[in-house]
Image (cartoon, rainbow, N blue to C red):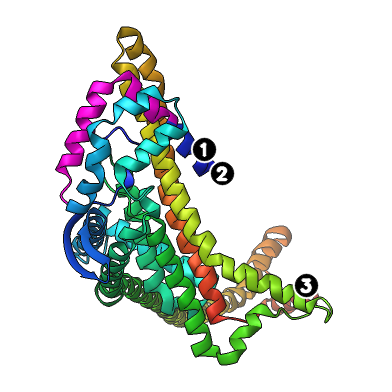
Amino acid sequence: MNKTWKLAAAAVLWGTATLAIPATASSLESSSASGRPAPMVVAQNTAPATTPHEPTGAHAPGEPAHGAAGEAHGGGFPPFNPANFASQLVWLIITFGALYFLMSRVTLPRIGRILEERHDRIAKDLEEARLRQAESEAAQQAYEKALTEARNKANAIAGEARNRLNAETDANRKALETSLNAKLADAEKSIAATKATALSHVRGIAVDTTSAIVSTLVGAGAPQQDVEAAVDAALASKSA
Amino acid sequence: MNIDPIHQFEVQRYVELLKLSGVSVSFTNSAAFMVGIVALIFFFLTYATRGRTLVPGRMQSVAEMGYEFIAKMVRDSAGTQGMVFFPLVFSLFVFVFVANVIGIVPYTFTVTAHIIVTAALALLVILTVVIYGFYKHGMHFLHLFVPSGVPAFLLPFVVLIEVVSFLSRPISLSLRLFANMLAGHIALKVFAFFVVGLGSVGALGWLGATLPFFMIVALTALELLVAILQAYVFAVLTSIYLNDAVHPGH
């Protein structure tokens, strides 16, 4: 439907165009007709090509113009001209056959190989990246493990050193304490001895003092034994 | 240059190679473009991948994207077993794609604007489906036309519909590409004539010619989209049809 409309429009236009520029149209028509190499087509063309604008100009545009166009080219509408079917078929078979052969044997495998290589390469690279990532993760874990171990070891060494130092300090302190205790005991002993000696002198002093006080108060010296007995009694009552 | 909008579809015979019982086989402009398309595709893809670099350059990226685009398309519609057809779908796609895009360039010949070419490509696809289907699955391939879970009294109609839809595939596949290319190129040429015609009238004509000129710019962009889209559609439908050859059960 669309096609027929186009054809009609084309025919109308062909008529008007030849009306408008008959000189150019005829010169072009004849030059192209004579330039045609095939003798058969030329023979069919010569008769109407000599006077193409004369009859078309006289006729009303439309059917007659279309008829003239058809005549000028021989065999009617070119796509429907069976005279050319054999040539087109033969060359289509040759060229399309060659194209199919070249595409299926040369070009498509070639492009396919390029795509496959890229695909393989990408897959390989991804695989390698995955491997590398696993490696780096393993390395990280190893590093962290080593770090933890080192920290533990350092802690252990530090703890050991601390314990050793503590033990040494304790031992030193104990030794010092024992020696100090011994000295203290000695000192206490000497103090006790000094106190005992001092206390043993108290009686003599008391006796002497009592004698002196008695002699001063009474005027006459009291017998030594009485004084000693009185002092002893006093000391005994005091200590009791 | 020719003022006729269908002159661009004219097949010009350069050298007649052989003539058998009135059927002439010649080296034509169509043949030259086919050879050029194949050479361009092969040399571009070979040149783009010459470095085989791990990190692709711009051209190698294009080649790889094309490869992966079609590979994904085939795998999505026909499954992993359908990958045997990957070279076929890839060849069809790049051939149609390059033919369509080259056709947009002025003065070039559009190979895919000829029904015989698109029909041959569509037939290639359908014959591949049929031959591979019977080769791989034998008579089981015919299950393609017998959907499971259909009531018995409806089955004849459903089978008929399935057969008709299967037979219409090569027609729609070839006509879609052909008609799109043909119509688009004619439309472009028609607007180009407006520009030339109006431009030859005078100053006012020059002014008027700017409108169809901008139309051509817009249409060229549209045609580029259509060219790419039709190549894509052709490849997608091919993969979907090939899926029937690989998995005939519905």
Disc 2 is placed on an element classified as loop
Identify the chain of the residue marked 1, using the numbered disc in the image. A
Check the image and report above or below for A98 versus B204.
below
Q: Which mark's residue is nearer the viewer, 2 or 3?
A: 2
Which residue is identified by label 3? A238
Sequence order check: which comes first, mark 2 or mark 3? Answer: 2
Q: Would you name the residue on which mark 2 appears?
A: A1
Between discs 1 and 3, the one toward the N terminus: 1
Secondary element at image label 1: helix
Looking at the picture, how far across and down is residue B226, in whole percent? 45, 46
Q: Is residue A73 left or right of residue B136?
A: left
Q: Is residue B174 above or below residue B102?
A: below
Q: Amino acid at mark 3?
A: Lys
Distance from label 1 to label 3 (Cα)?
A: 160 Å
Chain of the residue where label 2 is placed in the rendered structure: A
Which residue is tagged 1?
A5
Q: Are marks 1 and 3 in contact (CB under 8 Å)?
A: no
Q: Is residue A157 above or below residue B26?
A: below
Horizontally, residue A114 falls left or right of residue A227, namely left
